[in-house]
Image (cartoon, rainbow, N blue to C red):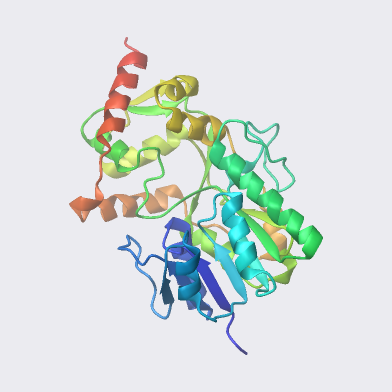
Amino acid sequence: MTALRVLFIGGSGIISSACSALAVERGIDLYLLNRGATRLRPVPDHVTVLQADVRNAESVADALGGRDFDVVVNWVAFTVDDVETDLERFRERIGQYIFISSASAYQTPPARIPITESTPLHNPYWQYSRDKIACEDRLIAVYRNEGFPATIVRPSHTYDKAAVPFHGGWTVIDRMRRGKEVIVQGDGTSLWTLTHSDDFAKAFVPLLGNSRTLGEAFHITSDDVLSWNQITTILADAAGAEAKIVHVPSDAIAAADPDWGAALLGDSAHSLIFDNSKLRRVVPDYVATITLEQSVREIIAWHDEDGSRKRVDADLDALMDKLAAQFVVTT
């Protein structure tokens, strides 16, 4: 049997790296199209890297040459223009096109949980999410009108050993170790779903070349649901520090930092729990098995082994000082 030939546009990020590794392990003939820059996450053996600037049509055309693919996955499409470029490039040439959307496209705040794929798409707070919704709308239209073989995948908050799953990344761990306060939105009791990239890959790779997915959307998440207070405490314990939590209203964070605020109000300030039943009808053996408690020590160790990985955002650190001073509760 001929191996499935798959092109990942991007392919070196948190999620896509794990999917690349598993795809190769399962015998897929994988190509990565990206700039070939220095990466935190190494490219697996037996992957063909095609170097190009994905925003430059001539550069991409030169890199692709006359190659054909069974499946194309775009990990770095964010606007309708990005999707239109892919439609022009791959129409009539592929058996499946997978668009990586976002679970933040779902109705925000959600009217009910758990979230299913039939939950409406509506996010008035975050332009990133609205752009993803517009991309989905375009792909569904071209599937219905032309039969373009589109599949939509919506990740939620996914992490690996190189990504601290908290706004600010290592800055937050650094603050904990220096005995400083850390900011948690609201009262910290909203529930959040975290998914390790290796678990995501176990669900995603079986979708490649799967005709049952065409014209459909799937979210891929774990069932590991924690409050933000719990997440903060788990991170602090792994770092050998104390979680000095200061609760700050999301609106106040948004007023101080509009970008942080958009991500909060448009996503992580709300309890989000997902129903993966639709996914399991297509990938019946999918089970997410990696919890935050299992993986967090690997995250800390990976950063500690190389000081250059422990990047602190000085501006964010100063902002957190300001918010902590403003909202800390004294007794």
Which residue in the rendered view is the most extreme toward the top?
331
Q: Residue furthest front?
A: 58
For image coordinates 65% across by 46% down, the residue present is 134
**Image position, residue 242 (x, y; %):** 28, 32
Please identify the residue farthest to the right as the structure is shown: 145
Between 230 and 279, the one nearer to me in the picture: 279
Q: Position of residue 117 (x, y in %)?
A: 71, 48
Total marks shown come to: 0
Identified at 63% across, 69% down, the residue is 90
Residue drawn where x is 25% and y is 34% of the image = 314
Relative horizontal placement of residue 119, taking residue 243 as reference (left or right): right
* Along the viewing direction, whichever of 192 and 123 lies nearer the viewer: 123
Quarter of the image with the C terminus in it: top left
Q: Quadrant of the N terminus?
A: bottom right
Q: Nearer the viewer, residue 205 or 78?
A: 78
Q: Would you say 302 lies left or right of 212 here?
A: left
Looking at the image, can residue 273 be seen? Answer: no
Horizontal side of 55 relative to 143 (left or right) equals: left
Q: Is residue 222 visible?
A: yes
Residue 107 place in picture, x, y as percent: 67, 36
